[in-house]
Image (cartoon, coloured by chain):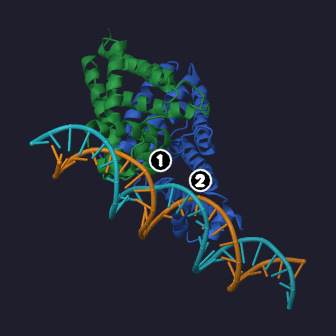
Chain colours: A green, B blue, C orange, D cyan
DNA sequence: GCTTAAGTGTACCGATCTGTTAACCTACTG
DNA sequence: CAGTAGGTTAACAGATCGGTACACTTAAGC
């Protein structure tokens, strides 16, 4: 059981789950898409749930590191980075493979709050919120935690709306709208420059 | 096939789907929970998808009418009603049966934008956005559509965050945070009173 | 050269999935 | 009273679900 083999399985399973959903994706389909045998799959992951949790761990890493890096590329001030988040999101929304937030979908399919999948999804959001709060504090916001929470609301709302808007079912440009709103909120929370 | 029998089935199916998810809820479970026979169920709804679409239609009616009425009870000015929406949401979030937005969950489980379930979910959001825009225009907002979209983002973000916060997995009071943000946005969009 | 770990293919398990079939019951209506 | 609409129970398709059993191959390490 080479560890990188396992990682490769998680990586491929991620794309399948992301495209297809969790319940709608059977282990047979995963086995077919990854090219691995079913026996091996179950040697690496004792249950489907364990595989999903591994997928979510990878997704958390990938997404957060991508977002953190991208906003640092786009701006070198903390308040600029908070704003730039919505430009990064915009880039994400326009990728053809964009299918919304994997953690929102996971918590939607595993609704019991005591379920590890639900808990892990919430943990991802908490980590993001903490990061926003750190940036807000560095930017000198009056109430950095409040600002962070409001920005998180805008981010989640933008993702959900972007999903709905994807097929033209909802009018508007969620990333642009969210950025505009964020600009307003930042101007009210930050001391006059 | 008395029509009210069908409505009763839709009503009961709604609670089961809302509690359990769509893919995770089998027709056998629905039959057991509604007390109806499987044959009758398939006489009323030719497929599971048709049942889900009927459930979503009912949910759209119920939710929108509840929300519209509640915010009218809480305020009699259009801008006051836009703010009161977040008080109404707060009441919803605190109900023990709260499990998030059914349309977000539906679009998460049926991701293909051409799928009728996905389209119907997006339509629900569009109708809400239109309603907000109407209120924003009545309130005299500079750009009522922009304000409506921003408020929709806050609403969706609050719902998603409330789901995550339900088991204590995410800190904060999403409804209160969203209301605070909405107050800021309104003050910037409305002409000085 | 032998052992062991890692992986393979395939067949299978019982349960559940959506959906169907057939025979029967019951109550209203012409 | 006969016909019919709406409902019942119960069994059954055919597929797929998560997960396992068994016999085999391949490659590395001692």
Same subunit: marks 1 and 2: no
Q: Which residue is mark 2?
A: B52
Q: Chain of mark 2?
A: B
Q: Which residue is mark 1?
A: A29
Camera-nearest residue between A4 and C11: C11
Residue drawn 66% across and 60% down? B45
Describe residue A89's horizontal placement relative to residue A171 as left or right.
left
Residue drawn 28% across and 35% down? A4
Q: Secondary structure at mark 1?
A: helix
Where in the figure is residue A34, as x and y percent of width and height?
Answer: 42, 41
Q: Secondary structure at mark 2?
A: helix
Q: Nearer the viewer, mark 1 or mark 2?
A: 1
Residue drawn 55% across and 28% down? B148
Describe residue A46's horizontal placement relative to residue B189 as left or right.
left
In the rendered image, the vertical position of residue A167 relative to residue B44, given as above or below: above
Where in the figure is residue B51, as x and y percent of width and height?
Answer: 62, 56
Camera-nearest residue between B170 and B105: B105
Question: On the image, which quarter does residue B160 sit in?
Answer: top left
Describe residue D20's horizontal placement relative to residue B51 as left or right.
left
Q: CA distance from mark 1 to mark 2?
A: 25 Å
């Amino acid at each position: 059981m080479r560890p990188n083999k396992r990682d490769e399985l998680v990586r491929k399973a991620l794309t399948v789950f992301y495209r297809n959903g969790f319940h709608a994706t059977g282990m047979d389909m995963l086995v077919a898409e990854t090219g691995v045998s079913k026996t091996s799959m179950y040697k690496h992951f004792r249950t489907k749930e364990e595989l999903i949790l591994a997928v979510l761990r990878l997704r958390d890493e990938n997404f957060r590191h991508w977002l953190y890096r991208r906003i640092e590329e786009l701006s070198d001030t903390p308040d600029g980075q908070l704003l730039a988040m919505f430009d990064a999101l915009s880039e994400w929304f326009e990728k053809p493979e964009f299918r919304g937030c994997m953690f929102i979908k996971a918590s939607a399919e595993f609704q019991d709050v005591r379920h590890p999948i639900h808990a892990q999804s919430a943990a991802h959001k908490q980590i993001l919120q903490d990061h926003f709060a750190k940036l807000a504090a560095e930017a000198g916001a009056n109430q950095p935690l409040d600002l962070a929470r409001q920005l998180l609301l805008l981010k989640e709302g933008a993702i959900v709306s972007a999903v709905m808007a994807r097929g033209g079912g909802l009018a508007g440009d969620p990333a642009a709208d969210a950025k505009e709103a964020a600009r307003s909120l930042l101007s009210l929370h930050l001391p006059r420059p």
